[in-house]
Each structure stands twice: as C-alpha cells, then as structure tokens.
Amino acid sequence: MKGILGKKLGMTQLFDPETGEVTPVTVIEAGPCPVVRVKTVESDGYEAVQVAFGSVADGRLSKPRLGQLGKAGAHRRLVEFRGPSELTPGETVTVEAFEPGERVKVSGIGIGKGFAGTIKRHNFKSGPKSHGSHNIRKPGSVGASATPARVRKGIRGAGRMGGKRVTQVGLTVHQVDPERNLLLVKGAVPGPRNGMVEVREDRTHGRA
C-alpha cells in the first residue's frame, strides 16, 4: 500500500497553455514522512507501515508517544497504512512516490457545519410554502401515538453536521512538485485549509 500524509493548503486552477483547458486542483503539502515501523504477518498478524508527519518539539509529546516514534523523532501525526509495502524503518516517503495520472483516495476530517436541521443535514424535502403553512422546514412526524408510542432509534433528525472523517475516492494526481513537497490532486478533498489529510493509492475505485 502506497500512502503519504500531508496538509491541505487550498484549491486553485491550472490552465493548459495549448488547449486552454481549466483544471481545478487541490494543493497538498505532503511529506516528507519518515517510516516509523513496518508490520508483518509473522510478527503482527497483518501487513502495514506506520509513517509520521509534522515535526514538533519533544516537549509537545508524551514520553510513550516519543518512545513509539523512536528514531523518527517527535512528530505531530502517526498513521498506519495497511497493506504490503517494500519500505523499511528509517526510510522517508516523499511526493515522488506518486506519479501524474495515478488514482488516489484522500481521507480527512470534514469541515464542521455546526447544528443543522433535517433539510440541510439529510436533504429532507420542505413543506408547502403557501399561505397559512406552519410546516415549511420542520422534520414532520417522527413517531406514532399508540404504537410504538415512542421515537424509534435511528430516526434522522436535526443535530451536529460535519466534523467527521470523510474519504474521497476516484481522485487523480495532476502534478507533483518534489522541490516544494507539493501534490496537486484533481478535484476537491475533505477538510478545511491547513487540515491534515491522508493520501492513499486507489486500486478499487476511481474514474477517469
């Protein structure tokens, strides 16, 4: 499994000088990510590789986390990518691991929208907007009187929207800039600006 950690810097547009085609891309500052540990089937029961990102001062982390990071030093994030890998502890993963045109999937914490109603949160239809209507944006009936005389579990309602882990599949690497550790991905990726994201190769999903 090929993967790297990065920080979402924002979105921009790239213009093709020959055709004039406009491509919306998300700029991700990815790596360098030192390899902390490589798990194998013999020792751990499954294959995976742990990489770190975002160096910080030693005092910002606890002693157990510093011991877990080992020779890689103090880093803000530690993520495990499951799957077979040819990496070894001590190596460094950079954006050069990806090539333009390669399909990837990006995971991150989506932007929190705060408290939202059912129309915005679950795409409910609104009620009649004619004169005298008192049910324009209300959720409607959520239970019954005699049976079951309660609101069943799992009923979609108003509440906190966003702020959860989201994975966007079917993305494509548009351009790689090794000098500035930048990865330009075609399309939008989850999360706010300066949000942490995980970029993985996408073998099962994707679109041209």
Image (tube, rainbow, N blue to C red):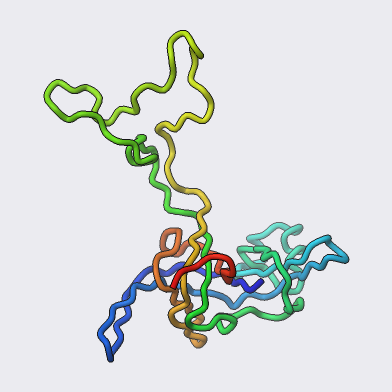
Quadrant in the picture for the N terminus = bottom right
Q: Residue furthest bottom?
A: 18
Seen in the picture, residue 102 relative to 144 is either above or below; the reply is below
* Rendering coords of residue 138 (x, y %): 30, 27
Q: Residue at x 38, y 40 (%)?
A: 121
Q: Residue at x 72, y 60 (%)?
A: 65
**In the displayed structure, does residue 130 sit left or right of residue 178?**
left
Q: Quadrant of residue 140?
A: top left
Quadrant in the picture for the C terminus = bottom left
* Rendering coords of residue 187 (x, y %): 39, 68
Total of numbered circles in the picture? Answer: 0
**In the displayed structure, does residue 7 sit left or right of residue 58?**
left
Q: Residue furthest left?
A: 131
**In the displayed structure, does residue 15 sit left or right of residue 161?**
left
* Rendering coords of residue 197 (x, y %): 52, 64
* Rendering coords of residue 205 (x, y %): 53, 65
> In front: 181, or 134?
134
> In front: 167, or 35?
167
Q: Residue at x 48, y 83 (%)?
A: 100
Q: Residue furthest top?
A: 146
**In the displayed structure, does residue 168 sit left or right of residue 35?**
left
Q: Residue at x 76, y 57 (%)?
A: 64
